[in-house]
Image: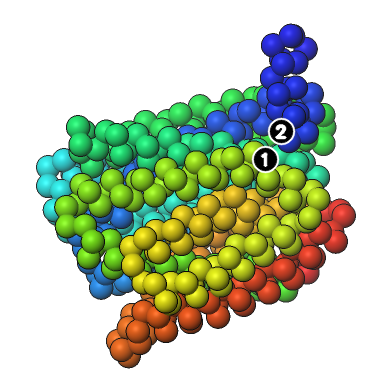
Amino acid sequence: MSGQDRWIQGALARIARVEAHEWRPVVAAFLLFFFVLGSYFAVRPVRETIATLLGRDRVADLWGYTAVFSVVIVFVYAWLLARVRRSVLLPAIYGSVAVILAALGASLRGDESNATVGAFFYVWISVLNLMLVSVCWSFLLELFTGEQSKRLFGLIAAGGTTGALVGPLLASLLVDRIGNSGVLYLGAAGFLGAIACQRVLLAQWRPASDATAGGARAAETGMGGNPFAGLFIVLRSPYLLGIALFVVLLSAVNTFLYFEQLRIVSETFADTARRTEVFATIDVVVQSLTVVSQLLLTGWIASRLGVRMLLTLVPLLMVLGFAVLSAVNVFGTIAALMVARRWGEYSFIRPGREMLWSTLDTETKYKAKSFIDVPVYRAADYVGAQAKTAIEALGTSPGATALIGAAVAAAWAVNGWLLGSRRDRSDGPARGA
């Protein structure tokens, strides 16, 4: 190991106890997440601006299409996993996203108010964002062991958070000069960077020991099985059904907050560029807090206090936050609550959710995980959106709606504690049962 290599490994070891043979794949994984999440979060403010143009009622309807296409894309993905080696499939997914983003940018450049293009973009990016993150984590779960996940996933997740910080910051700084279409071009370029990082990660991992190189060699063949395997695996496993319930409750809390955000921002800011700037600024604040937490707190909490603590802190914080929102329903309150929720989700919930999968087999990590991460999540989004609309139609006050959210968050906390406790008791590989 050269002096420079020792310096890099030593610096990483002070953050997450990275061992000498791990630093290269850890850096590659960090950069992979940087480009994937950086690209998505660069274009996310454009999605939110389009949502304000379409209106809350139209957006609620679009969530139904999002749920349907989320089911379709997962089964298509499972079919491809069975037949295409992952070292080809995963870069092809990133490349397709880059091409479509560039095409959408060209369309919006011609007519930003085109409702059809806007609706397509909203649904497409809402389906893809969960799939892209799920695919990333599935790939890394195949390469890193359960013990490594507790030590390293906080640091690796910080790569995504850094990208998620840089992406909206660039969008906020450049949107006045390049417009919303230019932001989409920026996102397309980022996904090309993700392709390079994914290839580098595979190449770096191959020289490792047999135990760790197995994932890289397996990526050279199709996985086999059928497109519906993920659904059947989940239905047979109480543990995986518990993870699905966790995602449903998480989605319900997020949905209540999301539509309150759309309502309050629409009422507060009339100019669409200003709305994009506001959404981008919130992203910058969230990611700034998150990257520090992931580097300093996530791995420490997971190793010392357990996964159950990662999965319980945020739901309990949301119970308190909804109680405050019920009394003070203004932009400042919803902005602070959205920052707290998203900071906690990215810092603790997301890494904790991924750690729940670390002891399971490869097919479960890819097929069952993508089924829960995408169609289950998006179906929960749609049901939550319709429930929120129904609650408002009944004339329920914003304060009472917030109290309903607090009750859901309390159930979420209990579910997270039970799941995390089971993961903390797990010492070796086992299929969820």
Is 381 placed above or below 43 here? below
Q: Is residue 331 left or right of residue 107?
A: right
Residue at 42 percent across and 76 percent down: it is 327
Which is more N-terminal, label 1 or label 2?
A: 2
**Rendering coords of residue 357 (x, y %):** 70, 55
Q: Is residue 138 left or right of residue 122?
A: right
**Camera-side residue of 384 and 228:** 384
Residue situated furthest bottom in the rendering: 394
Q: Is residue 105 left or right of residue 91?
A: left
**Camera-side residue of 208 and 264:** 264
Q: Is residue 274 left or right of residue 228?
A: left
Labels in figure, total: 2
Of the numbered discs in the image, which one, if any, rests on residue 426? none
**Camera-side residue of 218 and 22:** 22
Residue type at mark 2? Answer: Ile
Q: Is residue 221 visible?
A: no
Read off the residue under disc 2.
15
Q: Verify CB contact (< 8 Å) between mark 2 and mark 1.
A: yes
Helix, strand or loop for disc 1: helix
Query: How far, Cα to Cα, is label 2 from label 1?
Result: 7 Å
**Rendering coords of residue 247 (x, y %):** 57, 67
Read off the residue under disc 1.
296
Residue at 75 percent across and 45 percent down: it is 300
Residue at 16 percent across and 40 percent down: it is 109
Residue situated furthest front in the rendering: 328
Is 20 placed above or below 303 here? above
Q: Quadrant of residue 258?
A: bottom left
Q: How is the image coloured?
A: rainbow
**Camera-side residue of 149 and 318:** 318
